Amino acid sequence: QVQLQESGPGLVRPSQTLSLTCTVSGGSISSGGYYWNWIRQHPGKDLEWIGYIYYTGNIFYNPSLETRLSISVDTSKNQFSLKLSSVTAADTAVYYCARAPGASSAYYFDYWGQGTLVTVSS
Amino acid sequence: SYELTQPPSVSVSPGQTARITCSGDALPKKYAFWYQQKSGQAPVLVIYEDNRRPSGIPERFSGSRSGTMATLTISGAQVDDEADYYCYSTDISGNQKVFGGGTKLTVL
């Protein structure tokens, strides 16, 4: 069974860049067939999809974040990463990585990491 | 931007049927999905493609979709089902991937 694990700093200063990595185990990102996503949950509990990457490097971002966002993949490490620049307190959230089946007739998330809290504060 | 609307809370007694609704303009054309999130944990998929249950999800969880509304039904709700439930779907283009605001289910 596939497992996802987020890692990265829990505290980021305002205006700096938030960087997180998701390590995938139990399956290879480069085998294809799945999209690899970042999702965040604000303290008020709202869930927000951030963006996805395919193992080929194909990406798609939430338009509300795309000017500050970069998602990349490292198939040799079976990891994908998130960088969000110019952060503010509004970016404080639990960040999840999640897998989306590519072969489905609809886009959804079947496996999630446990999440990591990132706080933006000076 | 596209929105999915859920009631903030639903409360039932143990053994009763809980129904959680989700409304969205694109639902006549798009599947609905449901996630359960217990306190301090990641969301777990309990219903996909309107009414299909992933392996390991109890049969008391079911889903339906009609017009602009999708419904998650928990038949014979148990105390262990207390959680936040989120619906998820996309806009008509498929580009906006959206969660509802969540419904807190209380079973007591």
Image (spheres, coloured by chain):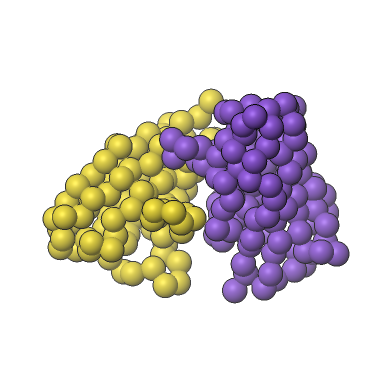
Chain colours: A purple, B yellow
The answer to which quarter of the image holds residue A33 is bottom right
Residue at image point 47% right, 45% down: B88
Residue B46 vertical position relative to residue A89 in the rendered view, above or below? below
Quadrant assignment for the N terminus of chain A: bottom right
> Observer-nearest residue: B78 or B3?
B78
State which quadrant residue A102 falls in. Answer: bottom right
Image check: A60 left or right of B32? right
Furthest residue toward front: A122
**Residue B49, how many percent across, how many down?**
46, 55
Drawn side of residue A101 relative to residue A72, left or right: left
Q: Residue at x 43, y 35 (%)?
A: A44
Question: Closer to the camera, B17 or B11?
Answer: B11
Nearer to me, B95 or A66: A66
- Residue A21 visible: yes
What is the x, y in percent for residue B34?
42, 52
Residue at (23, 44) in percent of width and height: B10
Q: Name the residue located 65 percent from the left edge and 29 percent from the top edge.
A: A122
**Number of numbered markers:** 0
Q: Position of residue A115 (x, y in %)?
A: 57, 53
- Measured as percent of width and height from the top left, residue A78 is found at 77, 64
Visible residue check, residue A100: no
